[in-house]
Structure formats: structure tokens, C-alpha cells
Image (spheres, rainbow, N blue to C red):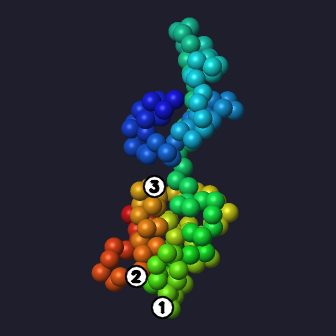
Amino acid sequence: VGELLQQVAKAVSEPVECLRLFHDTIVLGLDQGTTLLSHLDLKEGERGSDVLVLSLMIHAPRHVEWPSDSAWTGCGGNPTGTARCEGLGNCGDKCEDCGASTHWRCCGSSDRASEFCAPGTRPEQARRNNEIAMKPYDPDDEKPTYAEQA
């Protein structure tokens, strides 16, 4: 399944960790364990050969630190706010609507109940945004990038 997912990821230009393949009620993904394709039900194709029918779902990566909510309650995440983090995800005294308890700092999503980042977020960028907010604020340092800005 891993090799199949790698090929699909390459074909659709999406990270493999954001892909799930479905066959009836079976979910195939890198974190879904192992399922042998030979154990799946095949359908008869147009020319009498067996065909495996799969559905593809592409979703954003999980929030960095999910299911812990420290990335929700910590400094950063609001693309329209001003984050001045003290380090280790703590807000500084110059934070203004920085995103603490309103946005996931890794991607800027304001949906606390969703385990997934905002659509369009790449896993590498979500991890990098989290790293930036965990460091003490430096005006010359790299700023977080969110999907709607990419």
C-alpha cells in the first residue's frame, strides 16, 4: 500500500501523509496499518479482467502537537494578529490578537474541533510555523506562512 500511495502522491503532487485511499469501508493510508491489496474485493472490468476501484481523499495534515491543545492555546496562529512570542509557545507582552485560544499556530485555522490544518497547508510549513512560534520573537527572523498567503 505504501508504494501505491507514493505513486498516487507523485501523480497528484500532494504529500503522501495527506492521502487516504478508500475501498468500500476500508481506509488505506500510511498510518492505517497494513492491508494487502490482494485482500480487497475486485470488480469485473469492461473486458472481463479484475479491477480494483479506489476513491482518493486529500486532506491537510494534522495540527502540529495534535491532540494536545498547546498549539491552540499558545502564541501565534492568527494571520491578522501580532504575535510577539517569548519562546516555548508563550505569549509576550506585545502580542495583539496573536491567535492564542483562537487559532492553531501551525496553520492559522480557527476551527478548534478539527484535527486538520487549513486546506492548502503543507506539512513542512505547518511544522515550520510551529517552530517559529516556539522561538523568542526576533523582528529579523522568518515569519509564519499560512495557506491563504501561499
Q: Three-letter amino acid code at disc 2?
A: Tyr
Find disc 1 in the rendering and name its residue. 94
Q: Residues within 10 Å of mark 2 (few under 14, many from 20)?
A: some
Could you say whether the residue bearing mark 3 is in a helix, strand or loop? helix
Sequence-first tag of 3 and 2: 3
Where's residue 143, x and y in %?
A: 37, 74
Q: Residue at x 49, y 87 (%)?
A: 92
Q: CA distance from mark 1 to mark 3?
A: 29 Å
The quadrant the C terminus occupies is bottom left
Judge whether residue 149 can be spotted in this image: no
Q: Which mark is residue 116?
A: none
Residue at the (46%, 83%) spot, across then down: 86
Q: Which residue is mark 2?
A: 137
Decide which of 144, 59 is in the foreground and name it: 144
Task: Classify 10 Å Cα crowding around label 1: few (below 14), some (14-19), many (20 and above).
Answer: few
Marks 2,1: beta carbons within 8 A: yes
Q: Amino acid at mark 3?
A: Pro
Q: Earlier in the sequence, mark 2 or mark 1?
A: 1
Visible in this render: residue 27?
yes
x and y percentages locating residue 63 in the rendered image: 55, 60
Mark 3, residues whose alpha carbon is within 10 Å: few (<14), some, or many (≥20)?
many
Horizontal and vertical percent for residue 32? Answer: 60, 38
Look at 56% across and 8% down and name the residue there.
Answer: 48
Give the Cα distance between marks 3 and 2: 23 Å
Q: Outermost residue, front direction?
A: 88
Mark count: 3
Report the Cα–Cα distance between label 2 and label 1.
10 Å
Q: Amino acid at mark 1?
A: Lys
Q: Specify whether 8 is left or right of 118.
A: left
